[in-house]
Amino acid sequence: DVKVTQSSRYLVKRTGEKVFLECVQDMDHENMFWYRQDPGLGLRLIYFSYDVKMKEKGDIPEGYSVSREKKERFSLILESASTNQTSMYLCASRTPQQGAGGELFFGEGSRLTVL
Amino acid sequence: LAKTTQPISMDSYEGQEVNITCSHNNIATNDYITWYQQFPSQGPRFIIQGYKTKVTNEVASLFIPADRKSSTLSLPRVSLSDTAVYYCLVGDYRDDKIIFGKGTRLHILP
């Protein structure tokens, strides 16, 4: 079975702390994504990566950075957490395929609370 | 990715067929239409994808008219467990920046 694993389901951090959210996929996928989800706002793309060491900004990159040193791992970093970063964070991966296919596989999500 | 428009919410009853329509007027020739389902406190999961006419799998059917400017996700005989948010996405496999809209919140009533 395909698997996208996010390191923590629930985290509580304090304002100003550095936060790492880890995501690992076992499907040899090229593309990986980080989204955040807030009530009424749907899923919003933070960053994505189309290859190792390659990254692109999504729609809301401010306050975040990412790292992709290995193909299977994509990390989201909050350099200095703030209360407005309290959210559900979702990681996804896929292999782009011409024609049908290439769907996204999501992890279970990491619910971050910043106090 | 082509912009999509779908209803914000829908209610239905158990045992009914539910149809959720998505508009995508500027769909491009190489674009596919993909639907995802998301239960509370979980990540979205793929349910169906199509290019034209009709696609059916064990979960749903997807109807796409000839002009491809809209599509309809059909869920047969829904149950309470089909309560979820359903997202319609339209795009080409080369699109790396995959953007979700707000989806349709489907609420199934007993």
Image (cartoon, rainbow, N blue to C red):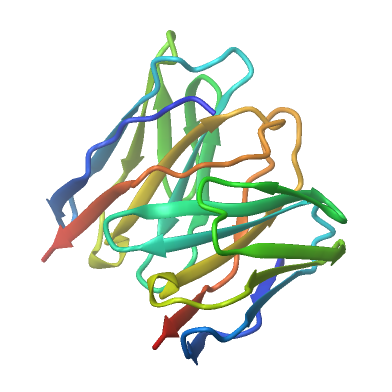
Q: Mark yes or no: residue B77 visible.
A: no
Q: Nearer the viewer, residue A80 or A104?
A: A80
Question: Is B97 positioned to the left or the right of A51 in the image?
Answer: left
Front residue (pair A101, A21) = A21
Residue A33: x, y in percent? 65, 55
Q: Residue at x 49, y 17 (%)?
A: B27
Q: Residue furthest top?
A: B67
Whether residue B44 is visible to the viewer of this picture, yes or no, is: yes
Give above or below for A113 relative to A97. below
- Judge from the rendering whether residue B14 lies leftward or rightward of residue A113; answer left or right: left
How many marks are shown on the rendered structure? Answer: 0
Q: Position of residue A94 (x, y in %)?
A: 71, 51
Instruction: Work out whether residue B1 or residue B43 is closer to the camera in this orientation and state it.
Output: B1
State the image coordinates of residue B56 (x, y, percent, origin top left): 48, 37
For image coordinates 85% across by 59% down, the residue present is: A28
Residue B46, position as x, y percentages in the image: 53, 51
Judge whether B5 appears above or below A93 on screen. Answer: above
Residue B20 left/right relative to B34: left
Q: Which quarter of the image is occupied by the C terminus of chain A?
A: bottom left
- Name above or below for residue A31 compared with residue B67: below
| Residue occupying the point 25% across, 53% down | B105
